[in-house]
């Protein structure tokens, strides 16, 4: 199955780095020109590999895929979160997440950058590339030490950064995340654990209590409040 067929089937988890490099970007500005009896598309389509050097696949699922990459023009590393327009629910969720994050500015919340282009086939969100997630950090700690649980001092630092992010979301932005868990918190620095960053605002809501009455449908079971 080629990459385009996998997108149509939402089989992002079957993508590898080489598949991602072959993804075609179809700009919204793309126009057609009449030529004889047929129609020719202006050659402004490109492979994603022309803009970004793909480093690795960070995660994938029915929603789409997250990749680590290096932007060729700036030589800076970023993370790209990609969803297919054909998957209306995933595309709508990513667009909403993108609009929400672009208006936030806080050291403990993942930063999103303007792509300066929109595409007919894919929704792409460019964001800062952090380090490992808190869950991965925990797993590595267990492997290295054989001890279950992080030291209290480290937990306190992580929670300090998380509480700052939550206070900003709730008090300044009127946003409820609705899926806080170790997988959605990444380390911004391996030396300072207070510099964690919250990401994945796909389930987040803003502005009105009417939007947050369906908590039962949201979040991850193990990390839901008991009520």
Image (cartoon, helix red, strand yellow):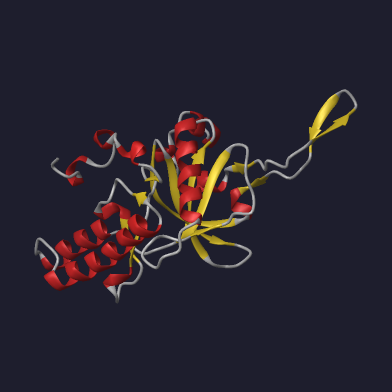
The residue closer to the viewer here, 156 or 212, is 212
Query: Which residue lies most toward the top here?
Result: 37
Indicate the position of residue 23 as horizontal and vertical percent values: 57, 43
* Residue 17 shows in this picture: no
The residue closer to the viewer here, 119 or 194, is 194
Indicate the position of residue 48 as horizontal and vertical percent values: 59, 49
Q: Residue at x 39, y 39 (%)?
A: 13
Image quadrant in which you'd find residue 170: bottom left
Q: Residue at x 33, y 70 (%)?
A: 195
Above or below, 121 relative to 192: above
Indicate the position of residue 194 as horizontal and vertical percent values: 28, 71
Q: Quadrant of the C terminus?
A: top left
Task: Please give left or right for residue 225 compared with residue 3 in the image.
Answer: left
* Residue 135 shows in this picture: yes
Indicate the position of residue 70 as horizontal and vertical percent values: 53, 62
Query: Which residue lies most toward the left here?
Result: 147
Task: Please give left or right for residue 200 compared with residue 27 in the image.
Answer: left
Task: Please give left or right for residue 27 compared with residue 223 in the image.
Answer: right
Q: Residue at x 12, y 70 (%)?
A: 152
Q: How many labels, in total?
A: 0
């Amino acid at each position: 199955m080629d990459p385009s067929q996998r997108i149509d089937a939402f089989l992002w988890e079957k993508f590898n780095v080489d598949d991602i490099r072959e993804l075609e970007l179809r700009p919204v500005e793309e126009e057609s020109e009449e030529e004889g009896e047929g129609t020719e598309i202006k050659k402004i389509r490109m492979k994603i590999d022309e803009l970004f050097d793909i480093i690795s696949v960070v995660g994938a699922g029915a929603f789409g895929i997250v990749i680590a990459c290096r932007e060729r023009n700036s030589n800076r590393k970023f993370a790209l979160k990609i969803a297919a327009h054909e998957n209306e629910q995933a595309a709508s969720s990513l667009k909403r997440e993108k609009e929400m994050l672009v208006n936030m500015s806080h050291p403990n919340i993942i930063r999103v950058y303007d792509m300066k282009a929109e595409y007919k086939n894919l929704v792409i969100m460019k964001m800062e590339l952090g380090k490992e997630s808190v869950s991965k950090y925990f797993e590595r700690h267990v492997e290295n030490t054989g001890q279950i649980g992080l030291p209290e001092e480290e937990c306190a630092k992580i929670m300090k950064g998380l509480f700052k992010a939550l206070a900003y979301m709730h008090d300044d932005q009127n946003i409820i995340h609705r899926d806080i868990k170790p997988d959605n918190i990444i380390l911004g620095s391996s030396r300072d654990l207070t510099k964690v960053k919250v990401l994945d605002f796909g389930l987040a809501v803003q502005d009105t209590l009417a939007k947050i009455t369906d908590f039962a449908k949201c979040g991850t079971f193990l990390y839901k409040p008991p009520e």
